[in-house]
Image: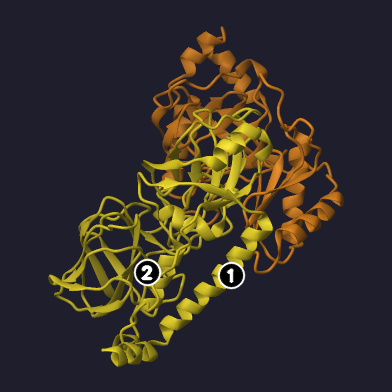
Chain colours: A orange, B yellow
């Protein structure tokens, strides 16, 4: 492996993402602290906007800022963003945590048994491990409302499939590499799936179409068939109970 | 309410307005037109606002009917347009009356065509816009492509618009014919000097692997010395990703909002419509410009387009001009 070409880079770093967006990178790796600063900067820009910013996109370790060059030029905006970042403090608040009910296994959780065998644990042990962790939403992206969840216990880390499956249902509970996920829309995926949740993290018909945002926390809670059926019915009637707790 | 009925539909036809803003952080890219210039001209030709929803199609048009008189205009590229079999011009407004059949053939010089109807298509907005986002299955008509039998609601056409003179795009669209201009980065440093030379030398062929999400280029493989995986970060329309295959993928209107491939460069906004309209199999080359130069190009382009659009509203002059010539 060659030495990365960018090894000399120092952070924070501003890079052009074309002529209508810039990226402010805080690091080249994933850490909770870095992500907290990214989210804090995005929040700060939302509550105290800079003229010309169209929208911001918080990701693991960088913030994409799109702008209108007819209002502000990239060079000026870069300087303003670096200045703004220098004043950002992380307050240590952990925000809210979504409790996601999961019915493990079944048609959607088609990899549960095989994963347990692979990990040399019982299905119950795997479920307990998955449900014991506190996950952080590092970013939303790839698909509408799709949360990249960090915090998967190391013993559950599993490489993605070599050949992605053509269609995985929305609400499928997945594991890909070091990350956990809740599928938000149906689509192809190379992740492994161990269950499904009756709740919808993305529902365009709902007034709050997206349940999660970057910086939120998530916990999984195992449920049985009866509770899943009751929750399915509540979701179908448009009145599901969404359970939040302090993170 | 006026309705538009789709009698026949090409394989890739959808409702689009200028797109969504504010939901990229929620994983929903803007969507909107692949060629925003042709889209805006179509709307203005029929007296619509820039953000009114219209039909976008790739390659093949379709057949349409209305139940009340409306104006329509077809833009994007050269294409056969007929009303009850009688040929009419594209890049111009025409009246379509109930009982008449509008038929739009195949684009010959472009990939993306636009059909605007006066009053605009008034499907229910989703997340603040009418643009269809196929991947997210939202917007437009049930978040999907249009199909024969679909009925779309149209806004009212003011009497003054219907009775007004025909509008024609007098000056043909001049599109810069040189290389596609790009801005370095954001992961320019993942690529060594040799990769950069190869990227800027090209040429690349626009492959058939293309849709509203992305287009793949064929050419000599580009190797990222810094690796083909990065910690996933945000993307824009025009981001040029280089996955391990070494074949650049340019993200387009319905892109995924984040990606884990290094992005060598980003297409200048001013050249995005031209890139979208590049025929499959055609060759393109890239040329570096600075972010500041690209901003200048975009600002000049925006002002020039505003002038072209304002010119379309001066229809009486256009009619006089045309009349004086004949």
Please indicate, yes or no, whether residue B277 appears anywhere in the rendered image: yes
Q: Residue at x 35, y 89 (%)?
A: B321
Question: Which residue is label 1 attached to?
Answer: B300
Q: Which mark is residue B320?
A: none
Which subunit holds the residue at mark 1?
B
Quadrant into which the C terminus of chain A falls:
top right
Please indicate, yes or no, whether residue B262 appears anywhere in the rendered image: no
Residue A5: % across, % down: 71, 30
Which subunit holds the residue at mark 2?
B
Residue A245: % across, % down: 68, 40
Quadrant into which the N terminus of chain A falls:
top right
Residue B252: % across, % down: 48, 50
Please state if A180 lies on the left or on the right of B36 as rendered: right
Q: Which dot, 2 or 1, sits closer to the camera?
A: 1
Mark 2–mark 1 distance (CA, rounded to whole Å): 32 Å
Disc 2: CA contacts within 10 A as few (<14), some (14-19) or many (>=20): many
Among all residues in the image, which is located at the extreme top?
A120
Question: Which residue is label 2 attached to?
Answer: B122
Q: Is residue A57 above or below residue B120?
A: above
Q: Is residue B82 above or below residue A139?
A: below
Residue B295: % across, % down: 64, 62
The front one of B295 and B40 is: B295
Q: Residue at x 65, y 60 (%)?
A: B293
Q: Residue at x 39, y 80 (%)?
A: B47
Q: Quadrant of residue A220?
A: top right
The front one of B39 and B2 is: B39
């Amino acid at each position: 492996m060659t030495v990365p070409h960018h090894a000399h880079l120092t952070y924070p770093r501003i890079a052009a993402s074309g002529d209508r967006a810039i990226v402010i990178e805080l690091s080249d790796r994933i850490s909770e602290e870095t992500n907290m600063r990214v989210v804090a900067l995005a929040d700060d820009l939302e509550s105290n906007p800079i003229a010309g910013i169209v929208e911001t996109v918080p990701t693991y370790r960088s913030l994409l800022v799109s702008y209108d060059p007819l209002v502000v030029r990239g060079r000026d905006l870069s300087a303003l963003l670096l200045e703004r970042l220098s004043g950002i403090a992380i307050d240590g608040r952990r925000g809210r945590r979504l409790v996601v009910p999961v019915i493990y296994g079944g048609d959607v959780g088609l990899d549960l048994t095989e994963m347990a065998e692979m990990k040399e644990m019982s299905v119950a042990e795997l479920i307990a491990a998955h449900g014991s962790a506190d996950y952080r939403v590092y970013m939303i992206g790839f698909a509408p409302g799709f949360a990249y969840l960090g915090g998967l216990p190391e013993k559950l880390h599993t490489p993605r499939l070599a050949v992605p499956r053509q269609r995985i249902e929305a609400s499928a509970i997945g594991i890909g590499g070091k990350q956990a996920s809740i599928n938000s829309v149906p689509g192809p995926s190379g992740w492994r799936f161990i269950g499904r949740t009756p709740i919808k993290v993305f529902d365009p018909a709902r007034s709050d179409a997206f349940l999660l945002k970057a910086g939120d926390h998530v916990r999984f809670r195992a449920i049985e068939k009866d509770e899943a059926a009751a929750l399915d019915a509540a979701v179908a009637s448009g009145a599901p109970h969404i359970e939040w707790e302090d993170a | 309410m006026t309705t538009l009925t789709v009698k026949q539909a090409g394989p890739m036809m959808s409702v689009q307005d200028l797109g969504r803003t504010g939901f990229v952080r929620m994983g929903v890219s803007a969507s909107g037109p692949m060629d925003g210039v042709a889209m805006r001209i179509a709307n203005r030709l029929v007296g619509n606002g820039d953000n009114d929803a219209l039909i976008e199609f790739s390659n093949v048009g379709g057949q349409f009917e209305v139940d009340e008189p409306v104006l329509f205009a077809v833009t994007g590229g050269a294409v056969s347009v007929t009303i009850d079999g009688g040929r009419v011009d594209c890049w111009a407004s025409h009246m379509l009356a109930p009982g008449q059949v509008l038929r739009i053939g195949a684009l010959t010089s472009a990939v993306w065509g636009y059909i605007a109807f006066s009053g605009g298509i008034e499907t229910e907005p989703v997340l603040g816009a009418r643009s269809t986002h196929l991947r997210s299955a939202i917007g437009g008509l049930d978040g999907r492509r249009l199909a024969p039998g679909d009925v779309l609601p149209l806004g009212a056409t003011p009497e003054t618009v219907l009775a007004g003179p025909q509008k024609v795009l007098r000056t043909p669209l001049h599109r810069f014919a040189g290389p596609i201009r790009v801005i370095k980065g954001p992961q320019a440093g993942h690529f060594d000097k040799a990769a950069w030379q190869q990227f800027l030398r090209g040429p690349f062929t626009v492959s058939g692997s293309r849709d509203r999400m992305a287009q793949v280029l064929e050419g000599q493989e580009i190797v990222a010395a810094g690796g083909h995986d990065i910690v996933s970060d945000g993307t824009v329309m025009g981001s040029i990703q280089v996955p391990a295959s070494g074949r650049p993928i340019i993200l387009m209107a319905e892109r995924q909002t984040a990606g884990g491939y290094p992005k060598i460069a980003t297409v200048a906004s001013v050249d995005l419509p031209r890139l979208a309209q590049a025929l499959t199999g055609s060759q393109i080359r890239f040329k570096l410009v600075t972010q500041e130069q690209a901003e200048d190009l975009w600002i000049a382009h925006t002002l020039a387009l505003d002038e072209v659009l304002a010119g379309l509203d001066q229809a009486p002059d256009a009619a006089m001009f045309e009349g004086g010539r004949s």
